Each structure stands twice: as structure tokens, then as C-alpha cells.
Image (spheres, rainbow, N blue to C red):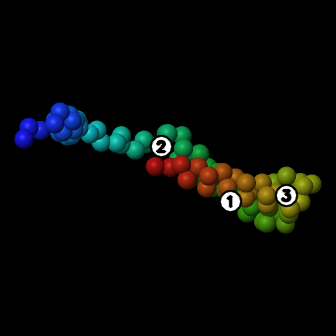
Amino acid sequence: MPKSKLRKKVVAQRAHKQDEVVHAPHEPKESPRWLAPTMVAGFLIGLFWIVTFYVTQTSYPVPGIGAWNMVIGFGFIGVGFGLATRWR
């Protein structure tokens, strides 16, 4: 018994799909050159800000805002961590 035309089409399509070249995914992108220095700077500025706040007995780095100096210091550290999540 002869094969149907539909079966020939399916076999031809499968053969065509096997011939297609599968491209490998692109290699991961590298981090921008500014990311690592900015990340480390955020960590160090935040650490310096908090240490200065404690060493000067809560009168510096910005006098008059009191404990908000801690928020600013942890904000710099938070920026450092935020950039660290994007580092590849």
C-alpha cells in the first residue's frame, strides 16, 4: 500500500528541523568597568561614615542631624550591596 502524502510531509519537516543549526546562548555579559570600584567605594564610604559617627561621639560627619548619620552610612553600604548583585 502506498504511503500518504501527509506522512511524507511530516517526515520531511522532521528532517528539516534536524538540519537546523541550534545556536548556543550568548556568553554572559561582563560587568561595566565602573561597577566594581563604585561598589567598593560605597562599602568604604558607608563604613567610614559610621565609624566617624561613633568615634566623634555622634557629633560628626554631619552635625545637627544626630542618628540620621547612621541611616546615611547604611545607605552607602546598601548601594554597595545593590551594585554587588549586578556584578558578573
Q: Is residue 86 left or right of residue 51?
A: left
Q: Give the farthest residue toward the front.
A: 1
Q: Is residue 84 left or right of residue 2?
A: right
**Amino acid at pointer 2:** Ser
Residue 6 drawn above or below residue 75: above
Say which residue appears at 79% left-offset and 58% top-offset.
71
User: Is any atom of residue 48 visible in this view?
Assistant: no
The residue to which callout 2 is attached is 31
Say which residue appears at 21% left-offset and 35% top-offset.
6
Say which residue appears at 79% left-offset and 60% top-offset.
70
Mark 1 → mark 3, Cα distance in angstroms: 15 Å
**Amino acid at pointer 1:** Leu
**Amino acid at pointer 3:** Trp
Q: Earlier in the sequence, mark 1 or mark 2?
A: 2
Please state which of residues 78 and 36 is positioned toward the viewer in this rendering: 78
Secondary element type, mark 2: loop
Q: Which mark is residue 78?
A: none
Which of labels 1 and 3 is toward the front? Answer: 3
Secondary element type, mark 3: helix
Q: Which mark is residue 47?
A: 1
User: Is any atom of residue 50 visible in this view?
Assistant: yes
Mark 2 → mark 3, Cα distance in angstroms: 33 Å
Residue 55 drawn above or below residue 63: below
> Which class describes the residues within 10 Å of circle 3: few (<14), some (14-19), or many (20+)?
few
> Which class describes the residues within 10 Å of circle 1: few (<14), some (14-19), or many (20+)?
some
Horizontal and vertical percent position of residue 54: 79, 66
Please state which of residues 52 and 50 is positioned toward the viewer in this rendering: 50
Quadrant location of the N terminus in the rendered image: top left
Horizontal and vertical percent position of residue 40: 58, 52
Say which residue appears at 34% left-offset and 42% top-offset.
25
Q: Which mark is residue 68?
A: 3
Q: Earlier in the sequence, mark 1 or mark 3?
A: 1
